[in-house]
Amino acid sequence: MSESEEYSLIILGKVNPEAPLPSDIYLHVDKKYIKFRSKGDMITQQKFDLFISKGVKNLYVKNEDIMMFLEWISETAEEEIEGLVAEGGEENRGVFERSAGMKEKVYDVFIEEELSTETVGVIQEQVASFVEGIQDDPLAAKAIRALMEKNASIADHSVNVANLAVYLGMALGHGHQFVLENIYMGSIFHDYGKAKIPAHLLENSGDRLYSQAINDHPLTGCKVIEKSSGVPKQVFSIIRQHHEQWNGGGYPQGLKADEIYDLAQVVALANTFDNLLQEHKRLPQAEKFKRAIKYIEMQNGKMFSPKLYPRVLDALKLAFGNFKRDTVVS
């Protein structure tokens, strides 16, 4: 038996990077199978995102471990859904399952070397279906809270931002299907340019070229996606401007105030909030939420438009703390 016949393929996108592995896993490099992680190890978020940048689609396990590994994938996915249901309610199971499916699709899109019009079309169809479901059964505050608890990869982050941005958009009065689809689509692709930063730069974050790539990622993402037809111009505005700030202190263009597209500000706020939760992930849940909400509160008229307030704060406090407006979040 040749060496290649001793190993079975595992799709990387189906593996939870923060769950202990049930067996050793291997990479296929230069026609050789190299052990990457041992049983009980985790892949980690950083390595997972690096794999996306490198276009690594598959991992491998020994043939004798394949059935156990596939069962583990199924069990961890089911456990994740059940955990969400326990926190967010049985009535939101469908939302949790659709969101999990969206994350898997986003991972598939980010891992591809080229973004085809066909692939973008598939994402648009899924977004339309997801948003339609939300309109029929609006995202509950406790469902959003549960969904935002996981941020294990750039794909998780993208879907987190999309879910929160649509929730906030509806709180701001945006109820039209087309508008909500644009918010969701722009959120899904807001960090596409970051996902395409070359791996050698990701591994040298102190390099000047890395800083430039981060600064340029909104424009880089747009340039790639613009090659695909059928994407509304509003989506490009969201992607291009999601790091612009109301006071002009953002990037890449230094836009300010009403120069910034209003939906880009909604996505920017959702992006900031999810990043804050990740930054404070080791804190107790209540403290993590309080700090994130307080930060958003302090950015009124700085990073974010005063037009978003107080409704975004009301929505965040409802979902992440059950606070009422004017409650002091310290």
Image (cartoon, helix red, strand yellow):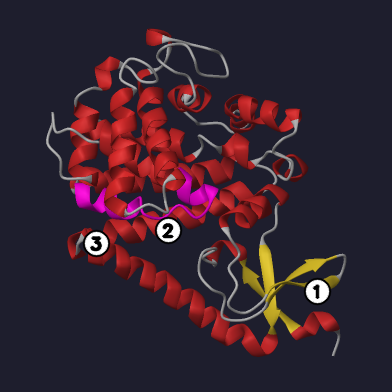
Can residue 42 be seen in the rendering of this structure? Answer: yes
Q: Is residue 207 left or right of residue 148?
A: right
**x%, y% of residue 182?**
39, 31
How far apart marks 3 and 1 lie (CA) works out to: 41 Å
Considering only vertical position in the picture, is 253 above or below 78? above
Tell me, for residue 124, which label it has, or none.
none
Look at label 2 and name its amino acid: Gly
Q: Is 130 within the magenta?
A: no
Look at label 3 and name its amino acid: Glu
Residue indicated by mark 2: 101
**x%, y% of residue 149?**
36, 54
Q: Is residue 46 left or right of residue 175?
A: right
Magenta stretch: give its range: 140-158
Tell me, for residue 33, which label it has, or none.
1
Q: Is residue 92 left or right of residue 185?
A: left
Residue indicated by mark 3: 87
Main SS category, magenta section: helix
Q: Residue at x 58, y 19 (%)?
A: 252
Q: Please rate how many residues cluster around mark 1, counting C-alpha atoms within 10 Å: few if below 14, some from 14 to 19, many from 20.
A: some
Residue toward you, 231 or 313: 313
Of mark 3 and mark 2, the one earlier in the sequence is: 3
Of mark 3 and mark 1, the one earlier in the sequence is: 1
Look at label 1 and name its amino acid: Tyr
* Label 3–label 2 contact, CB within 8 A: no
* Label 2–label 1 contact, CB within 8 A: no
Secondary structure at badge 2 equals: helix
Residue toward you, 116 or 96: 96
Q: Residue at x 78, y 84 (%)?
A: 5
